[in-house]
């Protein structure tokens, strides 16, 4: 059989079982081989009943000493009860609707039991455990993700049959010299060992090889994407001294800003379009870099545009760019959906004629009615908030224009290379002089009233505050954002104006609430994380975050960055009732540093890559086995190997067809 054959033709499957496999996204024999174990049961190290940890999963080895008659509940459920012993103690086992398993168990035989041990110190209980005959147990048994109608035994038997197909056809697609030099095992061997390891030491090299394949394929996709973007551009910018621009700024730019501007100027002077990411903390001055690029475009007689995800942010960017650029003779226009038809037509006429050098706006920028006379630079703020087609539609308003992406989400360089592999990266790792550090405190819920009183002190001085709730709707242990706002409005913050913001509100409603908060009409804004990346409110001096343990460190840092935008000392108060060692370590780390990149590195170690953006629009494929937090060495090896493979032209050779197909499939799934 071929690896590309439909799974229904594999021995032990058939049409009915193929439908169950389809629910697991397994359609071919190759798909089944790459349905990898999520963990392993190590039968070599059971614990005694006496030493079992209560309320946790335990592996026991014991003998069935008694089978009791089964019972029926009122709802027709069958309950089977058995007693097991291992000499140290006895354990009472209950099975639910598992008559087949109950009938197989024989008194006097030894079994492994895997499940949560409950009860008391004197009476141990296990409900619905996995039960495996000692004689049939391997030392190491894989545990797979399953679905209804699929069992471990069925899947394991089908997997054994699928692995026999490797005798006739290989899954190996990498160049042999790359694999030999890296000291990696063959992919076929890795698949055999990952599914049926003899010991834990078999799993390590198998996992390393499959992670290498996954990461190398991803890097090859990134290189292909980067190459596709290297078409020629007609906008080869002449370099100009930026002294006049720097002198016009109301502050001294940081060294990181000057370095990033220099990198952009160098990019824009080439005959291929710039494709650069400016990554920096909240308040690190990304807009200054954008303004410098717009100024260079203006000096070259071309236009630029900056697209923001919300109208409030677009307003903010338009105000900032106008302040920086209009004294230098650069006309800036604002275009957004809520403008009157008359005003939109006026702006569009000015863009089409070349009257405006810079356009700032939202989705209105890439609508069919919007035309530019000479668009050479496209800037996107928080690119992940836009779909790929939307970003491309804006770029198509020009002819292969330069592209600049701004992100206020500091992420580790390893992860940045994965997500933004097609971009060159500039990092703003210096904060502007004079910016006050946000004082951060982590407290338990017992001090909530004191935190409220602390907040009211600053409200009475004329400042404003955010209060963040994790949930839009009520969840276990948490009030909904609406209930929370109503409670504090009538109690602790009675007499203050309290507004509410959450993701289920209509865009126009959210825009209005943020505008009212910015204008000072709302003193306390109770919100979900929808304010994580939003408008600057220089008057906001307190950020109070409820259930802080529910958020990742990077997300907490982003939320904290909503305050400290003005001249006033600002504060962030993290409230949690989950006082575990892990949560204390995380919140202590956040309190001790304001470096977003340092925080993101720690977040990556503690939580894994997760999803730094809260959505999947950045198009990073999901990994079956690679772990960015743990596999940095493999990632480095994969990146070097991918560059060598790509440069050699291997993907275009006959022997590289399989690898090229894998790369194309990966990006189809991702996008």
Image (cartoon, helix red, strand yellow):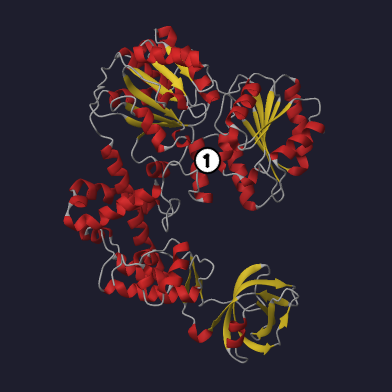
Location of residue 319 with respect to 49 vertically, above or below: above
The secondary element bearing badge 1 is classed as helix
Residue at screen point 43% across, 37% down: 387
Residue in front for this viewpoint, 228 or 464: 228
Q: Residues within 10 Å of mark 1 (few under 14, many from 20)?
A: many
Question: Looking at this rendering, what residue extends furthest in the bottom direction?
Answer: 108
Q: Residue 465 is drawn in which quadrant?
A: top right
Quick check: can you spot residue 197? no
The answer to whether residue 375 is above or below residue 382 is: above
Quadrant of the frame with the C terminus: top left
Residue that badge 1 annotates: 599
In front of the other: 446 or 236:
236
Image position, residue 549 (x, y; %): 64, 46
| Position of residue 445 measured from the top left corner of the image (x, y, whole percent) | 74, 43
Res 578 seen here: yes
Give me the residue at 40% from left, 37% from top. Answer: 388
Q: Is residue 327 above or below residue 236?
A: above
Residue 670 image offset from top left, x and y in percent:
40, 48
Residue shown at 35% from the left, 55% from the top: 214
Left or right of 493: which side holds 262?
left
What percent of the width, then of the height, locates residue 579? 69, 50
Which quadrant would the N terminus be assigned to in this image?
bottom left
């Amino acid at each position: 059989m071929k690896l590309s054959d439909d799974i229904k033709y594999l021995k032990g499957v058939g049409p009915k079982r193929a439908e169950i496999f389809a629910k697991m996204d397994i359609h071919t024999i190759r798909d089944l081989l790459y349905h990898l174990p999520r963990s392993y049961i190590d039968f070599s190290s059971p614990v005694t009943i006496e030493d079992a940890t209560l309320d946790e999963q335990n592996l026991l080895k014991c003998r069935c000493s008694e089978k009791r008659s089964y019972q029926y509940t009122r709802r027709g459920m069958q309950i089977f009860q058995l007693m097991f012993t291992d000499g140290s103690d006895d354990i009472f086992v209950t099975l639910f609707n598992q008559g087949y398993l109950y009938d197989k168990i024989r008194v006097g035989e030894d079994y492994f039991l895997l499940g949560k041990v409950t009860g008391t110190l004197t009476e141990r209980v296990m409900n619905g455990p996995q039960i495996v005959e000692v004689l049939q147990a391997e030392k190491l048994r894989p545990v797979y993700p399953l679905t209804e109608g699929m069992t471990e035994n069925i899947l394991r038997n089908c997997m054994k049959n699928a692995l026999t197909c490797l005798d006739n056809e290989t899954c190996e697609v990498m160049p042999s010299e790359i694999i030999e030099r890296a000291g990696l095992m063959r992919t076929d061997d890795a698949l055999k060992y990952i599914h049926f390891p003899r010991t834990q030491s078999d799993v390590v090299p198998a996992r390393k090889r499959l992670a290498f394949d996954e990461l190398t394929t991803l890097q090859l996709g990134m290189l292909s994407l980067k190459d596709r973007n290297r078409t020629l551009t007609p906008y080869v910018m002449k370099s100009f001294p930026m002294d006049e621009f720097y002198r016009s700024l109301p502050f001294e730019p940081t060294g990181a800003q000057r370095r990033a501007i220099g990198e952009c100027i160098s990019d824009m002077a080439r005959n291929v379009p710039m494709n650069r990411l400016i990554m920096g903390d909240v308040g690190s001055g990304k807009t200054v870099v954008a303004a410098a690029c717009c100024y260079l475009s203006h000096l070259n007689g071309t236009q630029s545009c900056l697209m923001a995800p919300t109208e409030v942010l677009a307003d903010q960017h338009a105000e900032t760019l106008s302040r920086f650029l209009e004294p230098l003779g650069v006309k800036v226009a604002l275009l957004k959906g809520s403008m009157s038809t008359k005003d939109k037509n006026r702006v569009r006429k000015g863009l089409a004629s070349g009257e405006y050098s810079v356009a700032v706006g939202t989705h209105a920028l890439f609508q069919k009615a919007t035309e530019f006379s000479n668009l050479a630079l496209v800037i996107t703020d928080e690119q992940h908030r836009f779909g790929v087609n939307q970003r491309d539609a804006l770029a198509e308003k020009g002819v292969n224009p330069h592209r600049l992406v701004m992100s206020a989400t500091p992420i580790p360089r390893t992860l940045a290379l994965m997500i933004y592999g097609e971009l060159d990266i500039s990092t703003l790792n210096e904060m502007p002089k004079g910016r006050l550090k946000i004082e951060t405190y982590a407290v338990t819920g017992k001090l909530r009233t004191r935190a409220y009183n602390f907040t009211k002190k600053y409200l009475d001085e004329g400042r404003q505050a955010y209060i963040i709730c994790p949930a839009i709707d009520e969840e276990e242990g948490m009030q909904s954002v609406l209930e929370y706002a109503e409670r504090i409005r009538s109690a602790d913050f009675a007499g203050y104006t309290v507004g509410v913001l959450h993701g289920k509100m209509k865009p126009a409603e959210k825009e209005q609430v943020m505008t009212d908060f910015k204008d000072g009409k709302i003193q306390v804004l109770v919100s979900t994380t929808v304010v994580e990346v939003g408008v600057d409110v220089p008057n906001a001096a307190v950020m109070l975050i409820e259930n802080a343990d529910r958020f990742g460190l990077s997300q907490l840092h982003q939320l904290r960055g909503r305050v400290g935008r003005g001249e006033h000392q600002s504060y962030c108060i993290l409230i949690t009732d989950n006082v575990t060692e892990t949560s204390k370590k995380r919140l202590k780390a956040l309190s001790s540093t304001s470096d977003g990149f340092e925080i993101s590195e720690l977040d990556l170690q503690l939580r894994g890559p997760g999803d730094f953006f809260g959505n999947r629009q950045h198009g990073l494929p999901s990994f079956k086995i690679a772990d960015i937090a743990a596999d940095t060495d493999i990632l480095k090896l994969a990146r070097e190997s991918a560059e060598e493979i790509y440069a050699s032209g291997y993907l275009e050779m006959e022997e590289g067809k399989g690898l090229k197909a894998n790369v194309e499939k990966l990006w189809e799934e991702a996008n």
